[in-house]
Image (spheres, rainbow, N blue to C red):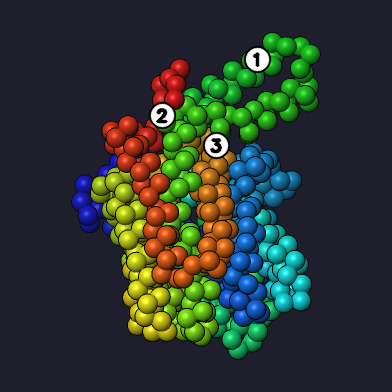
């Protein structure tokens, strides 16, 4: 659904539910830098090699595998907690409490003395963060109307970037004056922002589709016709079908679903390749922690805010797929800024220009991408399906990004960032094929019963 005017498209940002997504986005974005760019600066300062830093991209693998335990979060009721807070809010509070403890543990390690402990605790942080993402993403999709999803995606990106700012510039500032341990303890305390937001907002009401109810009722009837599958065994099988099988079966009724998954995995590969090596790149050019914080985190945030808000309005006006194409092309071209920075060297002005362009274009692309993932979810299986889709994106990025350090060690920075631009081409080519195959945005709708890929 497209807004009838640019004013209508922009006014949606004043909705109370949209504002709540801003703070939940902060909670989602906070842990990412603490196992990514901020941790990379800590490792590089300790003399860890670029190859090892690149391999550290694998510690975030839980983000790519979160669809494995998403069915539990989608359907499993927590004793007492679910009854008091609700299904989504209860799981959100539990995952956030675990995340706080994990960040304290990661901040207590010393990567120079025992890199393996740092890596292990980083994996635990990523697991808790991925679990929080499962809940918050489902909460967002279920709380908003269809015509609010674009604005919700843009607001999520905005809050996400505020969280990354806190964990990026904020953590670097604190580390500069008080050390890395205090920096991570401070970030752990900021997890309470998401917890307070959850407590101040209501559990979303979800209208389950008739198709999903019919599919699960068919399984219940099938079990009832087999007397040997009774009692707890029948209940377990029915639960497993509804929680695990049905979400994936429903998704596979969509037209071109295999191509959709390939597109999701490839859309941001070029951005990921450049992003994993950005922090080591800045350090190698001679930028200090405060310069990196001021330019890439504080200044860059405003470019991302503008890009994300523009992305939400663009999606509302031209549709999700066209928004993806516009954002994808801009995202690819923006990597030229890093090429120019590599030639300029230690130049704060060149750094600011590169970061501004990259963040503006990345904000537009990400807003469209999140809105697209949201449009693919069925209300009955929101958490599981969104986790599956975002996992495909993360899996592609992790596998591709883990080789970024190897590539950076074997070529100069100019060649590396030119190569990163080529990483965006597969996703754009698949997107063009989908747009031609589906004639607009039909790609987000299930195929008729009995249709084949």
Query: Is tag 2's residue or tag 1's residue first in the polypeptide sequence?
Result: 1
The image shows residue 22, relative to residue 453, as above or below, that is below
Percent x, y for residue 304?
38, 66
Query: Which disc is residue 222 wearing?
Result: 1
Mark 2 element type? loop
The image shows residue 133, relative to residue 434, as above or below, that is below
Report if residue 294 is visible in the image.
yes
Viewer-side residue, 212 vs 407:
407
What residue sits 31% from the left and 49% below the top? 325
CB contact under 8 Å: marks 3 and 2: no
Viewer-side residue, 380 vs 63:
63
What residue sits 63% from the left and 72% below the top? 49
Residue 6: quarter of image:
bottom left
Query: Which disc is residue 380 wearing?
Result: none
Q: Is residue 371 left or right of residue 109?
A: left
Query: Is tag 3's residue or tag 2's residue first in the polypeptide sequence?
Result: 2
Neighbor class of circle 2 (other Cα within 10 Å; few <14, some 14-19, many 20+) is many
Q: CA distance from mark 2 to mark 1?
A: 27 Å
Residue 112: quarter of image:
bottom right
Mark 1 element type? helix
Viewer-side residue, 154 vs 203:
154
Which label lies toward us, 3 or 2?
2
Mark 3 element type? helix
Percent x, y for residue 307?
34, 63
Q: Is residue 203 left or right of residue 443?
A: right
Q: CA distance from mark 1 to mark 3?
A: 21 Å
Neighbor class of circle 1 (other Cα within 10 Å; few <14, some 14-19, many 20+) is few
Q: Is residue 93 left or right of residue 257?
A: right
Percent x, y for residue 385?
53, 39
Query: Which disc is residue 381 wearing?
Result: 3
Q: Which residue is mark 2?
A: 255
């Amino acid at each position: 659904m497209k807004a009838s005017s640019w004013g209508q498209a922009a006014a949606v940002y004043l909705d109370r539910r949209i504002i709540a997504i801003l703070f939940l986005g902060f909670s989602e974005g906070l842990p990412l830098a603490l196992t990514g760019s901020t941790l990379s600066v800590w490792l590089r300062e300790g003399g860890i090699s670029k190859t090892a830093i690149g391999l550290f991209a694998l510690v975030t693998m839980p983000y790519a595998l979160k669809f494995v335990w998403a069915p539990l979060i989608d359907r499993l009721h927590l004793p007492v907690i679910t009854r008091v807070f609700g299904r989504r809010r209860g799981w959100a509070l539990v995952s956030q409490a675990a995340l706080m403890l994990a960040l304290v543990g990661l901040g207590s390690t010393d990567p120079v003395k025992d890199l393996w402990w740092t890596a292990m605790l980083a994996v635990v942080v990523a697991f808790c963060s991925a679990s929080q993402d499962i809940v918050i993403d489902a909460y967002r999709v279920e709380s908003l109307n269809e015509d609010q999803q674009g604005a919700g995606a843009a607001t999520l990106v905005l809050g996400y970037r505020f969280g990354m700012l806190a964990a990026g510039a904020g953590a670097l500032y604190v580390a500069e004056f008080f050390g890395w341990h205090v920096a991570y303890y401070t970030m752990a305390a900021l997890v309470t922002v998401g917890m307070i937001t959850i407590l101040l907002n209501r559990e979303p009401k979800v209208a389950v589709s008739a198709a999903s109810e019919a599919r699960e009722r068919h399984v219940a009837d099938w079990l009832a016709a087999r007397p040997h599958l009774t009692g707890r065994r029948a209940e377990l099988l029915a639960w497993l079908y509804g929680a695990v099988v049905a979400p994936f079966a429903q998704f596979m009724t969509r037209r071109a679903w295999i191509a959709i998954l390939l597109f999701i995995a490839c859309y941001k590969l070029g951005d990921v390749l450049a992003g994993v090596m950005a922090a080591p790149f800045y350090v190698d050019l001679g930028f200090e922690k405060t310069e990196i914080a001021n330019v890439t985190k504080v200044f860059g945030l405003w470019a991302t805010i503008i890009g994300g808000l523009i992305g939400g309005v663009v999606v509302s006006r031209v549709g999700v797929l066209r928004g993806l194409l516009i954002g994808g092309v801009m995202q690819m071209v923006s990597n030229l800024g890093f090429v120019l920075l590599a030639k300029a060297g230690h130049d704060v002005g060149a750094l600011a220009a590169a970061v501004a362009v990259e963040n503006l274009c990345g904000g537009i692309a990400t807003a469209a991408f999140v809105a697209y993932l949201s449009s693919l979810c069925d209300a009955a299986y929101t958490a599981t399906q969104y986790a599956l889709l975002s996992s495909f994106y993360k899996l592609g990025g992790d596998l591709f990004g883990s080789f970024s350090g190897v590539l950076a060690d074997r070529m100069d920075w100019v060649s590396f960032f030119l190569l990163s631009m080529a990483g965006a081409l597969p996703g754009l080519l698949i997107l063009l094929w989908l747009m031609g195959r589906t004639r607009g945005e039909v790609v987000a709708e299930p195929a008729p019963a009995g249709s084949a890929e």
